[in-house]
Image (spheres, rainbow, N blue to C red):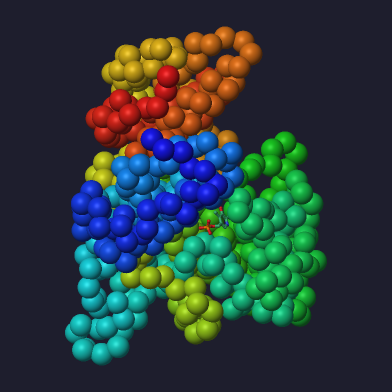
Amino acid sequence: MTTVKASQRLMLPSVDRILRLPALAGLQAQYGRLFLTDLTRAVLAEIRESAARGDGSEPAPSDEDIVGAIASRAVRETRPSLVPVFNLTGTVLHTNLGRAALPREAVEAVAAVSRGASNLEFDLEKGARGDRDSHIDALLCKLTGAEAATVVNNNAAAVFLVLNTLALRKEVPVSRGELIEIGGAFRMPDIMARAGCKLREVGTTNRTHPKDFEGAIGPRTAMLMTVHTSNYEVQGFTARVPEETLAALAHSHGLPYVVDLGSGTLVDLGVYGLPHEETPAEAIAAGADLVTFSGDKLLGGPQAGIIVGRRDLIAKLRRNPLKRALRLDKMTIAALSAVLALYLDKDRLAEQLPTLRMLSRPVADIRAAAGRLAPEVARRLEAVATVDTEECRSQIGSGALPVDLLPSVALRIRPKSEGRGSGAALNRIAAAFRALPMPVIGRIQNDAFLLDLRCLEEESAFLGQLHQLDLP
Ligand SMILES: *Cc1c(COP(=O)(O)O)cnc(C)c1O
């Protein structure tokens, strides 16, 4: 090893010489000459800069060091940022972790249409231009009992499109108990303002009566609306106006009645031992003219906003130029149509749809998994932590059924270092799990790192990477 002196800084090998090294041939075949030249320049510049910052006593890098640095930079720069993870947080529909897991049928449908051309907006029978909604609207009508349906980018877009189409420069009375904020900047008052309509607050936070709505209806009123309070519940001395009442009131004034359901499941969750959540079919039966809901919450599909209801109103939504800006892409349409098709066979839905499968997974099954996995994880973490199992509660997530928790079982990992510094040890363990090739995301609670096993379906993939945990 030689030493880089100030006078020797320019003695670093040239880019050309590095590129001619036989050791670089493999990388060159893999990444291409142009990209490798860029990487080599960047690595040499980095070495030069760090030498300039030092006192001149650092050893000059060998050719092997430089090739190694180029190889790891190549991996770093080409690695995708968005990768699959294990969601062991205990929140089944975790917005930050991509919400619903798609069934195999949907993944295959996405691959099939994205590989080449498709009949996205082409009517194969007539040989003429078609409509992209045609691939899903019949199924949506069948599953919800609606006359017509359309789809947009997400439920926020669905609400926005409805407001902008039906209530531009007009008023929309909404109960003060329903002026929701959903995580990530979806606030009903802001959406209303941006959609170009005027929010007319009625009632109070905990109690709103039919007469509050009646008093708010005037010549500028565009529609009445109920917003599902997805992520909280108002309890105690409360009163809300039933959908049937609000629908009748709207219709007696010739106004449309809109329900933003938020989650919107297409089946009675009670059948699967879960708390009941209102379905679009129920909202329509109660008199809603339009119902909006998400594709990737309880429905278990891709990110999408679904609007079902009266044919004339859906036609109006389709004519709004904003529909073009908010429309779904072909991959999402493929995934959504595959997910909706699974709903036709309700007997096997809980097996085939991952969201429902995970939500309805029996706790005995999760407990058995915990019993299998705990000893294996304990063996790997022996030097740093103790591992046992703990009964815990999973949540549905994404604002669906906010107060209902599902009994579950977690691996409980506690660092062996006691007292001061164990918080840091806990964070190190959580970070090591996040740094795995397929990152494992858990939660820290009561001085332990918990891995809720409800959503772990691929146990061998989980165990197979544990030897790569970077822990002392
Ligand atoms: C989740 C939710 C939304 C937003 O839906 P996204 O699909 O996340 O855009 C709107 N309204 C309600 C009531 C919701 O629960």
In what quadrant of the picture does the N terminus appear? top left
* Number of disc labels: 0
In what quadrant of the picture does the C terminus appear? top left
| Image height of 238 relative to 191, above or below | above
| Image height of 250 relative to 47, above or below | below
Q: Position of residue 344 (x, y in %)?
A: 27, 55
Q: Nearer the viewer, residue 455 or 36?
A: 36
Residue found at x 38% / y 12%: 382
Quarter-of-image position of residue 149: bottom left
Residue 459 lies left or right of residue 162; in this view the side is left
> Which residue is outermost to the front?
7
Q: Position of residue 184 (x, y in %)?
A: 60, 54
Please say whether residue 209 is visible from this viewpoint: no
Residue found at x 25% / y 57%: 20
Q: Position of residue 215 (x, y in %)?
A: 80, 66
Q: Quadrant of ligand 1?
A: bottom right
Q: Position of residue 71 (x, y in %)?
A: 32, 48
Q: Nearer the viewer, residue 221 or 305?
A: 305
Please say whether residue 6 is visible from this viewpoint: yes
Residue 275 lies left or right of residue 141; in this view the side is right
Residue found at x 57% / y 60%: 260
| Image height of 157 relative to 270, above or below | below
Q: Nearer the viewer, residue 195 or 385?
A: 385
Q: Nearer the viewer, residue 372 or 243?
A: 372
Quarter-of-image position of residue 174: bottom right
